[in-house]
Amino acid sequence: MDERFKHYPLQAAESDFYAGNEGEKVLSAAVIGCGRVFPTHADALVKSSYAKLKAVVDIDETRAGEMAEKYNCEQYTDYRDVLTRKDIDVVHICTPHHLHFRMAVDVMNSGKHVLLEKPLAINVDDAQKIIETAKTTGKSLGVCFQNRYNPTSIWIKQFLDSGRAGRIIGCRAFLTWYRDEEYYKSEQWRGTWSMEGGGVLINQALHSIDLIQWFIGEADWLKASIDTRLLKGVIEVEDTAEITIGFKNGAKCLFYASLCYTMNSPLFLELHCENAVITLNDGIYVTYSDGKEEFIQNPDKVSGSVAYWGLSHEKLIEDYYGCLITGKSFLIDGEQAIKSLKIVKAAYESSRTGETIGL
C-alpha cells in the first residue's frame, strides 16, 4: 500500500485493543434491523477480533430467523427484549430513520452503548436529546459516517491539517446517483418526510456533507433549493438539491446532489486552497500553485474491492470497539454527527422560505 495511506484515523492503537484472554472476543453485540445495511454490520462483527454478534432483531420474524441462522446467534422481533440481557454490551441500530431516536434513547437508558447508522435522527431536537442521553447515562454513542475512514478522505484531511495546502478558500462537490420507483416502493418508509425525514440530502448525500464540514470546518449560513424531478407522485421528498454554504472561516461551498442520473457515480469534490487545488474523484489530484501536479491513486480502487462509495464500515466498527475497550474517544460521536443534520434541515427550511438560513 502507498505509504501515504498507512495512517488511518484509528483512535485506539491496534496493540491496545486486546483486553481479554487470547482468542476471546471481549464485547458482545446485538443488531436491530436486518435490512439493506445489516450484512455490512454483521460481517464486520464476524471478522472483528474484539466483538461478537450475539443477537439480531427485526419485526419480520422470518427475516430475523434467517439472519440468526446465518450468523449463529439468537433472534428477536422486539428490540426491548435485547435491552434486558446483561450479556449485551453494544447495540447497533440499523433501522429506518424515524426509529433512531426512540431506540437510541432506550438502548442507552438500559445501560448499553449505541452504534447508530446515519442520520442521528430525522430532526435536530431529537438528535440533541440523543446526545444528552449519552451524556447523562455515560454510554458511548457512535454514528456511522464511515467515509471519513476511506483512504482518500484520510489523505485529504491529513494534507489539510499539515498546512501545506494553506487556507481553504472554496469547495464544490457533486453527487449524482440513481434511485428508481422500485427502490422507494420496496420499503414504505422511503420517500416520506415523516419516516425518512427527507430525500437525497438526509440519506444518500449526508455522507458527502459530513466530509465537507469535516474538511472545512463549522458552517455559518446557507441558501438552498430542493426539487422532485423524476418521481413526483411516487415520493414526497426531494430527489435533487443545490446548496450554497458559507463557513465561519470564510470559505464557501457549492454543493449539488441528485438521484436522477443513470448510475451511482463517485463523489466529485474539489477544494480550492491558497497553495493547491485538491480534487477527489476515483483518486486524488493535487495541483499546486507553482504548477506542479500530483496524483494519488485510491488504494481501494487498486485492490478492486471498492463496490460502492463508502467501503469503510469495517474500519469504523473495529475502531469503535477499540475505543470502547481502551476508554478512548470515538472519532464520530453525536456532536460530530449532528453537524451535517443541521445543514440538511437548514437546507430544507431555506428552500421552503427562499431565505438564507444562519447556522
Image (cartoon, rainbow, N blue to C red):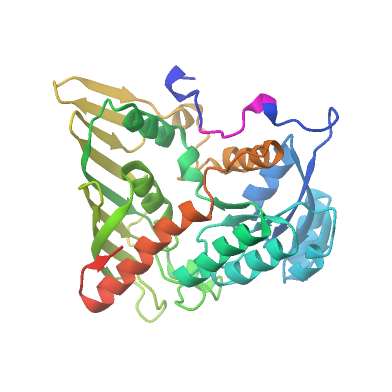
Q: Is residue 348 left or right of residue 7?
A: left
Residue 66: in sight, yes or no? yes
User: Which image quarter is the C terminus in?
Assistant: bottom left
* Above or below for 312 versus 298: below
Q: Is residue 233 left or right of residue 38?
A: left
Q: Is residue 137 magenta?
A: no
Q: Residue 223 location in percent, x, y?
A: 22, 65
Residue 35: in sight, yes or no? no
* Above or below for 238 versus 42: below
Q: Residue 28 location in percent, x, y?
A: 78, 48
Residue located 61% across and 59% down the image: 134
Q: Nearer the viewer, residue 81 or 125?
A: 125
Q: Nearer the viewer, residue 182 or 75?
A: 75
**Quadrant in which residue 320 is drawn:** top right
Residue at the extreme bottom? 233
Residue at the extreme front? 136
**Quadrant in which residue 36 is drawn:** bottom right
Residue located 45% across and 59% down the image: 338
Q: Residue 122 location in percent, x, y?
A: 48, 70
Residue located 57% across and 63% down the image: 132
Q: How many marks?
A: 0
**Quadrant in which residue 281 is drawn:** top left
The rendered magenta stretch, by its main secondary structure, is classed as loop
Q: Is residue 301 left or right of residue 286?
A: right
Q: Residue 263 location in percent, x, y?
A: 38, 53
Residue located 22% across and 35% down the image: 167
* Above or below for 201 versus 318: below
Q: Which residues are magenta?
A: 9-15
